[in-house]
Amino acid sequence: MVLRTDFDRLTTRVFDSATRSAGARLDAYREGDSFFIDIDLPGVDPAGIDITVDRKVLTVRAQRKRAERDGVQYVVAERPMGPVSRQVFLSDSLDTDRLDARYDNGVLTLSIPVTEKAKPRKFEVAAA
């Protein structure tokens, strides 16, 4: 016989591991001559965020840590803790050498300029 509390613990464990393996949630969009990626990283120390680009693969790694307090025993601990990472495959049309990263209110915003060769161009038609 499975008790309700045992089932709840098992369900919590399954959903907790699924949430961790899913990685950080993100939005990606282009605005003008820049490409933006907003990644949710609540509870992360901005100094501990690691951003790398290797052969057009952007990797963001961070660590969520629970504040340690003496004498505290958690009754419920649902917020995911531990390593968080996300990879994004970037287009060749982005200038990753000029990537800019900002962290505000739990959101990491990456701004990557579009290269000159990838920007829309207009061509004149010569009359015969």
Image (cartoon, rainbow, N blue to C red):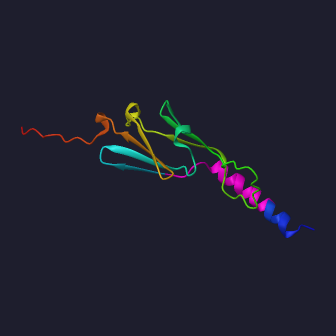
**Exactly how many numbered labels are in the figure?**
0
Residue 108 image point, x, y percent: 48, 46
Quadrant holding the C terminus: top left
Image quadrant assignment for residue 110: top left
Going by the image, does 117 lie left or right of 100? left
**Closest to the observer: 9 or 72?**
72
* Residue under the point 84% across and 69% down: 4
Quadrant holding the N terminus: bottom right
Query: In the orientation shown, which residue stands out farthest toward the right?
Result: 1
Vertically, is 116 above or below 70?
A: above
* Residue under the point 48% across and 53% down: 105
Q: Which residues are magenta?
A: 10-26
Indicate yes or no whether the magenta region holds residue 15: yes
Residue 56 image point, x, y percent: 47, 33
**Closest to the observer: 93 or 84?**
84
* Residue under the point 51% across and 51% down: 106
Residue 85 image point, x, y percent: 59, 42
**Closest to the observer: 71 or 50?**
71
Image quadrant assignment for residue 114: top left
Vertically, is 54 above or below 28?
A: above
Magenta stretch secondary structure, dominant? helix
Image quadrant assignment for residue 115: top left
Residue 97 image point, x, y percent: 39, 30
Indicate yes or no whether the magenta region holds residue 41: no
* Residue under the point 69% across and 48% down: 68
Query: In the orientation shown, which residue stands out farthest toward the front?
Result: 70
